[in-house]
């Protein structure tokens, strides 16, 4: 061997062989490393100069792979941490890409706007997307030079009948005939210009066509019946919309079928959306300024009469999906998107920190290798390239594993989101993202170890006297602090969100939601036979009460303007149109006056109820409100007397405070509440099914329970809670993997010291404390940092709710104890293992 070595390395080799004596490990290590570079005759100083670029990079990856296999525990920790981080990052990237791709496929999308109606209630500016059918044609008529198209979209439910088969569809839209000319929904059959040319036309989605007729070809020219009234011929098939648009539909039919409805011929209405296509040269802001005169021209007199102050605005199509206005379209939540992105960044950062920490602390083990390479002629840039190459290799392996994990978790992920993501692993930009992850994370995670390891002094490294130094230890501890600060923050966030959701769910809402069925009045048969349906139910002992109304608690409540006795200005309040059984069915509490009485026919025309907030805002006590008159300026315009005041109840989400509410017996029936008698829920459901089959036999009964409204109102918040809980656990797991690696390295470096201490009489307990305290110091610092950050963030999040849980001290104590406990268990495993080892093993070589 000596004959093959030349130059400065020869002296080092001779000394190491002499020092080793019979132990061949040191010189065999040198030989192994040298043979990696030149299997034949070794010429150290020329090795790197003789390697071409391809060979050099091949060498980097080959050595990186061997190092992975050499220390399997550290490699497993490195790869596991990065894999989990990249998997979470990839899941969230797909979600975010899907969210921001909504409505981006329309060829004219840059010039399409949705018309919105803005108004002010008690100084608060609000807006809705619903308009009447009058706006579209008028806008096109008055602004023909600026607006090229105006398309109206009316969402609805309906019963589809095909011979003997019936389907209750929730996603039907009636639209103007140039709908497919404005929007770029891909038609699989038919032409955009004429598929809706005739009133009896209908366009089905691909999935609907297959569900009805087996295939899209079989569906063409077939006839379906809608709501037992309209016979429609299939003239086109459109590709499934999926999650790519805020508009969801399974059937599209011409709006001309509803031209005689009140909402199509009355300006003060709100039943459909209006989209306009602006000419390329038109300035949106300038056109919005002209809409003031437009509103005054067509609605000026009526708005003045009713006391409304409406304004029109234009919302770009790409912003509609994230619009928070209440309507039936599909919308996303930007807060949820940003939370997802934030968590992804945190977890990926933790994975990178693990890699940096573990690669750096392995520097002592690889110091001889670095020294040999430098003696053999390697430049620092070569070494940096090698270590970054190893980092890229590990990142690449982690990316491959993360794809497998994502495929495994994708069904669960779609279920969590509540819809199937349009963006998939087969999308081109997903692979671009993965390549970016490999490059960026590989460089980010590998840069510090690369520069750190390449800076070793070759003389000190080959003498075996290399020290990592206090600076490196401080940096590693700082990284651990960051990791566990994130973990503490996520634990606090998870706990507070769960606590708030539990508080909201269990809060006394002011009404009784138990054992109450909600049935929508969504077809002509149930509406026409409503009295008969209610009578059938009231005869049954299993049913306590039945009430018909315009909206159940948690649903939509119109805002109307009122003239009030003693008040000069018009007053705005939420309205509930309900029958005489409303108070008893919901179990509302009367605090003044009386309820509606079936024995007084005059109550139907002359009476209203209000809530405590309404009385208070009008400057009255509940008793003072009684017998005052109030007149709805929009609906019946009849003076009605206030006969009773009910205690406030949360008829809307707990994110908003209780507003003024006027309960009137006007007919505007949209919902039926059916209260079951105690202990007879099953019998009640069976009774409702039988009664519904009698009055609306063509329609299937669909219902939900009133107490399930919680899940509907707080769906986004519940999703945030679930995601935060899962990802908090992932973050803690990845952080603990890194801490486990640090503990393994520390015990390994102090193996002989532990043996000496045991021989001198140290107990297992004292050794465990000795090894644990240094590793737990950064965790304690992380707790001190993470708790106030978590407190601030969650206090800000709770501001979204009008009713908030308290930020109790035990939440932060729990986060601190949990983090310290998990970290202690992680560290103690290695500490106890080393403390209980036989000291002979560590001291025999001495």
Image (spheres, rainbow, N blue to C red):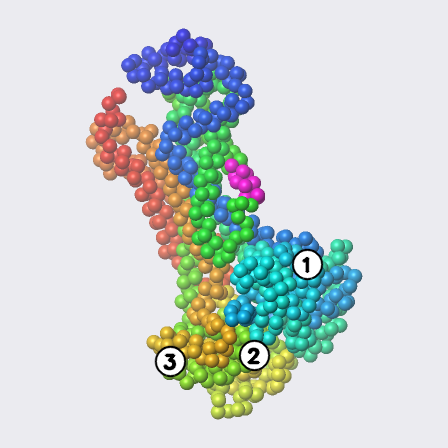
Going 60% across and 65% down the picture, which residue do you hit?
Answer: 222
Q: Does 209 lie within the magenta span? A: no
Task: Report crowding for label 3: few under 14, some 14 to 19, many 20 or more residues within 10 A (C-alpha).
Answer: many
As drawn, 299 above or below 320: below
Mark 1, secondary structure of its residue? loop
Q: What quarter of the picture does the N terminus occupy?
A: top left
As drawn, 421 above or below 327: above
Residue 841 is left or right of residue 670, and the answer is left
Report x, y in % for residue 357.
42, 34
Report x, y in % for residue 70.
37, 28
Q: CA distance from mark 1 to mark 3?
A: 55 Å
| Earlier-in-chain disc, 3 versus 2 | 3
Q: CA distance from mark 2 to mark 1?
A: 40 Å
Q: What quarter of the picture does the C terminus occupy?
A: top left
Mark 2, secondary structure of its residue? loop
Circle on res. 542: 3
Task: Report crowding for label 1: few under 14, some 14 to 19, many 20 or more residues within 10 A (C-alpha).
Answer: some
Residue 361 is left or right of residue 575, and the answer is left
Indicate which label's residue lies in the foreground, 3 or 2: 3
Going 34% across and 13% down the picture, which residue do you hit?
Answer: 17
Task: Name the residue carrying label 1.
Answer: 191
Magenta segment, which residues?
428-438
Please say if the residues under marks 2 and 1 sit with CB atoms less than 8 Å apart.
Answer: no
Task: Name the residue carrying label 2.
Answer: 668
As drawn, 267 above or below 176: below
- Can residue 251 be seen here? The reply is yes
Give the main secondary structure of the magenta stretch.
helix
Q: Nearer the viewer, residue 124 or 78?
A: 78
Indicate which label's residue lies in the foreground, 1 or 3: 1
Going 47% across and 32% down the picture, which residue do you hit?
Answer: 393
| Earlier-in-chain disc, 2 versus 1 | 1
């Amino acid at each position: 061997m000596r004959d093959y070595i030349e130059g400065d390395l020869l002296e080092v080799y001779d000394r190491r062989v002499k020092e080793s004596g019979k132990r061949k490990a040191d010189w065999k290590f040198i030989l192994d490393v040298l043979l990696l570079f030149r299997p034949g005759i070794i010429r150290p100083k020329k090795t790197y100069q003789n390697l071409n670029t391809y060979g050099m990079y091949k060498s980097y990856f080959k050595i990186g792979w061997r190092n992975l296999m050499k220390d399997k525990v550290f490699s497993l920790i490195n790869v596991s941490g990065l894999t989990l981080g990249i998997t979470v990052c990839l899941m969230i990237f797909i979600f975010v890409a899907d969210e921001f791709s909504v409505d981006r496929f329309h060829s004219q999308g840059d010039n399409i706007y949705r018309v919105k109606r803005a108004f002010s209630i008690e100084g608060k500016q609000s807006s809705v997307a619903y308009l009447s059918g009058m706006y579209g044609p008028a806008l096109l008529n008055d602004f023909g030079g600026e607006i090229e198209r105006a398309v109206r979209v009316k969402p609805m439910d309906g019963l589809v009948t095909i011979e003997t088969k019936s389907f209750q569809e929730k996603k039907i839209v009636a639209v103007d005939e140039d709908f497919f000319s404005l929007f770029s929904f891909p038609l699989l059959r038919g032409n955009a210009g004429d598929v809706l040319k005739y009133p009896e036309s209908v366009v089905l989605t691909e999935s609907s066509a297959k569900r009805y007729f087996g295939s899209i070809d079989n569906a063409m020219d077939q006839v379906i019946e809608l709501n037992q009234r309209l016979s429609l011929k299939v003239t086109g098939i459109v590709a499934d919309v999926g999650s790519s648009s805020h508009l969801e539909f399974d059937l599209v039919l011409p709006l001309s079928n509803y031209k005689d409805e009140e909402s199509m011929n009355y300006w003060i209405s709100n039943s459909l959306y209006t989209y306009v296509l602006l000419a390329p040269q038109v300035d949106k802001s300038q056109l919005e300024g002209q809409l003031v005169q437009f509103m005054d021209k067509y609605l000026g007199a009526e708005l003045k009469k009713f006391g409304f102050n409406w304004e029109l605005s234009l919302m770009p199509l790409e912003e509609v999906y994230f619009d928070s206005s209440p309507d039936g379209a599909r919308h996303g939540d930007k807060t949820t998107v940003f939370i997802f992105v934030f968590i992804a960044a945190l977890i990926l950062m933790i994975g990178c920190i693990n890699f940096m920490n573990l690669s750096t602390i392995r520097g002592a083990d690889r110091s001889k290798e670095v020294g040999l390479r430098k003696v053999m002629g390697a430049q620092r840039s070569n070494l940096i390239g090698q270590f970054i190459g190893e980092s890229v290799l590990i990142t690449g392996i982690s990316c491959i594993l993360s794809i497998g994990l994502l495929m495994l978790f994708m069904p669960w992920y779609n279920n969590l989101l509540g819809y199937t993501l349009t963006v998939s692993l087969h999308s081109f930009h997903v692979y671009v993202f993965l390549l970016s992850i490999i490059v960026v994370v590989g460089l980010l995670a590998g840069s510090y170890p690369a520069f750190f390891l390449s800076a070793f002094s070759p003389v000190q490294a080959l003498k075996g006297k290399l020290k990592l130094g206090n600076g490196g230890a401080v940096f590693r501890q700082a990284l651990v602090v960051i990791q566990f600060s994130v973990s503490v923050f996520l634990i606090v966030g998870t706990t507070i969100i769960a606590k708030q959701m539990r508080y909201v769910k269990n809060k006394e809402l002011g009404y009784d939601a138990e054992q109450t069925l909600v049935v929508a009045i969504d077809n002509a048969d149930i509406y026409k036979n409503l009295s008969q349906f209610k009578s059938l139910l009231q005869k049954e002992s299993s049913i306590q009460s039945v009430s018909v109304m315009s909206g159940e608690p948690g649903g939509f409540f119109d805002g109307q303007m009122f003239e009030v006795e003693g008040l000069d200005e018009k007053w705005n309040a939420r309205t509930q149109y309900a029958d005489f059984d409303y108070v008893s069915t919901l179990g509302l509490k009367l605090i003044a006056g009386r309820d509606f009485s079936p024995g007084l026919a005059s109550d139907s025309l002359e009476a209203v109820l209000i809530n405590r907030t309404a009385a208070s805002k009008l400057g009255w006590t509940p008793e003072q409100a009684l017998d005052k008159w109030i007149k709805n300026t929009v609906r019946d315009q009849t003076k009605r007397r206030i006969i009773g005041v009910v205690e406030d109840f949360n008829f809307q989400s707990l994110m908003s405070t209780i507003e003024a509410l006027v309960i009137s017996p006007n007919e505007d029936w949209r919902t039926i509440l059916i209260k079951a008698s105690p202990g007879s829920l099953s019998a009640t459901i069976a009774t409702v099914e039988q009664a519904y089959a009698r009055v609306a036999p063509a329609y299937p009964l669909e219902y939900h329970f009133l107490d399930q409204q919680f899940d509907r109102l707080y769906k986004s918040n519940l999703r945030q809670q679930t995601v935060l809980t899962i990802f908090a656990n992932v973050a803690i797991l990845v952080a603990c993997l890194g801490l486990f690696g640090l503990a393994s390295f520390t015990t390994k470096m102090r193996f002989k010291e532990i043996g000496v201490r045991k021989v001198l009489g140290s107990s297992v307990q004292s050794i465990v404390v000795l090894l644990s305290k240094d590793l737990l110091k950064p965790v304690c610092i992380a707790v001190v940092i993470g708790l106030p950050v978590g407190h601030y963030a969650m206090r800000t999040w709770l501001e979204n709710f009008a009713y908030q849980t308290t930020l109790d001290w035990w939440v932060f104590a729990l986060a601190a104890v949990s983090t310290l406990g998990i970290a202690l268990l992680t560290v103690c495993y290695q500490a106890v293992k080393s403390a209980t080892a036989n000291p002979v093993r560590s001291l025999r070589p001495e």
